[in-house]
Image (cartoon, rainbow, N blue to C red):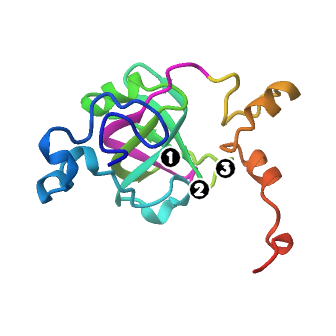
Amino acid sequence: MPGLGGTARCGVRLSRPLLSGPRSASLSHEAATHDDLSWPQRDCGCGTLRAADAGRRVTLCGWVDKQRNLGGLVFVDVRDHTGIVQVVSAPEGAARLALERVRPEYVILVTGTVRSKAAANERIASGAVEVLAEEVRVLNVVARSLPFQVGGADAISEEVRLRCACLRRATGRRALTPPRVQVPSA
């Protein structure tokens, strides 16, 4: 069966086969519940959190936009298709160690509690809250740095912009997605 050996359908070589041995030809119940075949689920989008969600335990998944280490605390901005939210670590614990190691464009899964911030950030929709990380899991790392920061408003050359055609930027998505009125109906 394609995709069950050491190669995924997209041609990327996996570090180890998802299934191997005599059971790889048929999926058993034991194999279907194996950790390699499960995928974490998020509760809500990063940009959907508001002050009314304070005290709620959430699971978020997204790209690391920025990471700031201020000695005792680590702040990470996590971005997905709904927006950005700030994730903060406790001064001690495994979540702090994991947040110290992440870099821009890593994909992470964060489970934590939403809390109100003393000073709201008016530039982002979820600026009134932050997520206190209890568990952080790195889902994907970036081996090479990108030619520009995806979340930033940095001016990039036209050649680099056209070569990369990054759809994670809101401006790139809007440029390539026609308005609903122009999409022909079947």
Residue for point 41% across, 47% down: 131
Dominant SS type (magenta):
strand
Spatial distance from mark 1 to mark 2, Cα to Cα?
23 Å
Quadrant where the C terminus is found in the figure: bottom right
Q: Which mark is residue 122?
A: 3
Residue type, mark 2 in image: Thr
Nearest the camera: 7 or 1? Answer: 1
Nearer the viewer's eye, disc 1 or disc 2?
Answer: 2
| Res 149 → quadrant | top right
The total of numbered circles placed on residues is 3
For marks 2 and 3, the one nearer the N-term is 2
Q: Position of residue 14 (x, y in %)?
A: 36, 31
Check disc 3 and report its element: helix, strand or loop: loop
Residue visible at 71% across and 38% down in the picture: 166
The amino acid sitting under disc 3 is Glu
Q: Which residues are magenta?
A: 126-145
| Residue to which mark 2 is pinned | 82
Few, some or many residues within 10 Å of mark 3 (<14, 14–19, 20+): few
Residue at 41%, 19% in the rendered image: 71
Could you tell me which secondary element the residue under label 1 belongs to? loop
Instruction: Describe residue 101's horizontal placement relative to residue 20 as left or right.
Output: right
Identify the disc placed on residue 118: 1
Mark closer to the chain start, 1 or 2: 2
- Asked whether residue 137 is drawn in magenta, I would say yes
- Left-right relation of 97 to 31: right
166 sits to left or right of 120: right
Q: Is residue 157 visible?
A: no
